[in-house]
Image (cartoon, helix red, strand yellow):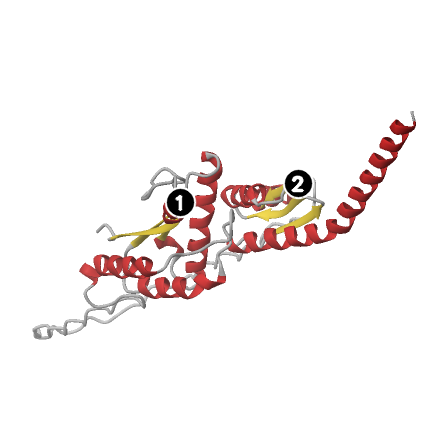
Amino acid sequence: MRIVAIVLAGLVALAGLSWACVAREAPKIESELHSSVATALRALDASWASVAIDGRDLTLTGEAPNESARQQALAMANYLQGVRIVHDQVVLISASTDLAGTKDTGTIEPAEVSPSPKPIKTKPIKTKPTEARPEVPPVAKPTPAAPTEAAETSPGNVDSAASCQREIDTLLANERIHFMAASAAIESASYPLLDALAEALRDCPKATVHIGGHTDSEGTSHFNEMLSATRAEAVRNYLIRKRISPNRLVAQGFGSQQPIADNTTDEGRSQNRRIEFMIHRETP
């Protein structure tokens, strides 16, 4: 009986010590988790989102511009290391606008409409007949100069897409875009490479750029597809901030479906975790 009492006392003491350790580390864990989530959301250009953290539980709030942005933010929050549960309290801007515009609120007033100008009454003007004048042959007008191209155009636009592809391939052959582990947050060391890629894309202003995200085979296929898609989107957002037209940029995630190396080795998996660029000439 005495042995049982001693064992129970030891277990109670161990539990108390464990609780004390957890209580002491909880603020640090929350702080690190909040930093990771905030960094990931910035990479997605999701400035509309806010986070609240309780232990390892995360509550995501804010007004998303569209459903795609909402899903990307939720997916990234769910897949960040250390997050246990994500509570979704995100609403769509269109939905909140619709609610605000209902008659029950009584706060939305109709937009002011400028009245159409009244027609001006005119009186017919009597004119005197004029004498016929000899016909004068028309003078040929000078041919106007051809309009200049937009700001992003460059000489040799016909082959600019192919040239641009070669330049992009050369940049990515020497260096790769790096992200934080299991995250779409771009490492700051890759900013100079992305700046160089943006500069290269200005040489083919009429081309469409497909940004493909790829992962290794570690983890579930669903996780890899979401991770590759959010990483490609993070690269797209970075280029948009560098004044590359968003209409030219298409981001897509392929997960682990298109490996270029052996996923059974560390080196192969490292090669498979990549961002690819495909430059397509604009269809006439």
What label sits on residue 169 in the rendered view?
none
Which residue is at 73% across, 49% downward?
A: 26
Task: Classify 10 Å Cα crowding around label 2: few (below 14), some (14-19), many (20 and above).
Answer: few
Near-viewer residue (41 or 215): 215
Q: Is residue 254 left or right of residue 72?
A: left
Give me the residue at 33% from left, 40% from top.
258
Count of numbered circles in the view: 2
The disc at residue 103 is 2
Q: Reading the chain from its start, which is encountered first: label 1 or label 2?
A: 2
How far apart marks 1 and 2 lie (CA) works out to 57 Å
Mark 1: secondary structure: helix
Q: Residue at x 33, y 64 (%)?
A: 124
| Residue type, mark 1 in image | Arg
Compared with 55, 235 (above or below) is below
Mark 1, mark 2: which one is toward the viewer? 1
Asked whether residue 112 appears in the rendered view, the answer is: no
Image coords of residue 148 (percent x, y): 24, 69
For residue 139, which quarter of the picture?
A: bottom left
Q: Residue 51 location, x and y as percent?
A: 65, 49
Decide if residue 93 is in sight here: yes
Identify which amino acid the numbered label 2 is placed on: Lys
Q: Which residue is mark 1?
A: 269
- Where residue 181 appears, x then y in whole percent? 51, 50
**Placement of 34 over or under 5, stated as above or below:** below
- Name the image quarter holding residue 170: bottom left
